[in-house]
Image: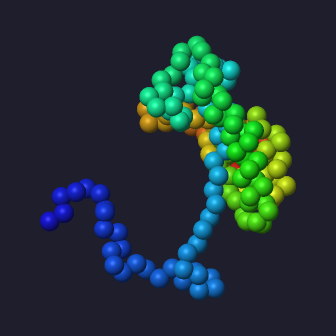
Amino acid sequence: MNRYPRDMHGYGPTPPNADWPGGAHVAVQFVLNYEEGGENNILHGDAASEAFLVDVLGAAPWPDQRHANVESMYEYGARAGFWRLHRLFTEANLPVTIYGVATALMRAPAQLAAMQEAGWEIASHGLKWVQHKDMPPDEERRQIAEAIRLHTVATGSRPLG
């Protein structure tokens, strides 16, 4: 009897044959999130600083205040982390998909140009970092439409899929 509501068994000992090209046994896709500049920040009109996606244990939003530690983490990703990964992947001539937060892409013209020059796919990763769990459907639709609009402005093409 299985009383647990989640499927923890999967295919079990007999997984399906994936039949990858060239007889490969594994397929790898590199996907990088580009979020720097899409986090909550009073500079963006938000009520408080980012507290959800940070490497600060127990971080709490700071209403009406900038949070230098959190801003520094996001800025590091844009200033150094992105460029290290860009060099790594372009030198190896590996394809990359970027999950680009629309407001972050709008604030990163140099990084966006580098992504495009490398021929990387740029997928839409929403408007900005916000919790959608309790968001009213009309507001969610508005944010999706704005994400598509900004993505199109930033990249020159509408996200597909």
Which residue is painted at 30% across and 68% down in the image? 9
Mark yes or no: residue 105 visible: no
The picture quadrant where one finds residue 26 is bottom right
Q: Is residue 6 left or right of residue 90?
A: left
Mark yes or no: residue 117 visible: yes
Relative height, residue 120 to residue 23 (above, below):
above
Q: How was the colour assigned to the protein in this rendering?
A: rainbow
Which residue is painted at 48% across and 27% down in the image? 59
Is residue 28 or residue 72 the one in the foreground?
72
Q: Residue furthest bottom?
A: 23
Where is residue 151 shown, x and y percent of the image?
72, 43
Q: Is residue 83 left or right of residue 134?
A: right
Relative height, residue 149 to residue 116 (above, below):
above
Which residue is painted at 52% across and 28% down in the image? 51
Is residue 9 or residue 55 the one in the foreground?
55
Count of labels shown? 0
Relative height, residue 31 to residue 107 (above, below):
below
Where is residue 43 shown, x and y percent of the image?
68, 21
Which residue is painted at 76% across and 47% down in the image? 83
Q: Residue furthest left?
A: 1
Q: Residue furthest top?
A: 64
The picture quadrant where one finds residue 154 is top right
Where is residue 87 shown, x and y percent of the image?
78, 55
Quarter of the picture containing the C terminus is bottom right
Q: Is residue 116 left or right of residue 46?
A: right
Is residue 146 or residue 108 the one in the foreground?
108
Quarter of the picture containing the N terminus is bottom left
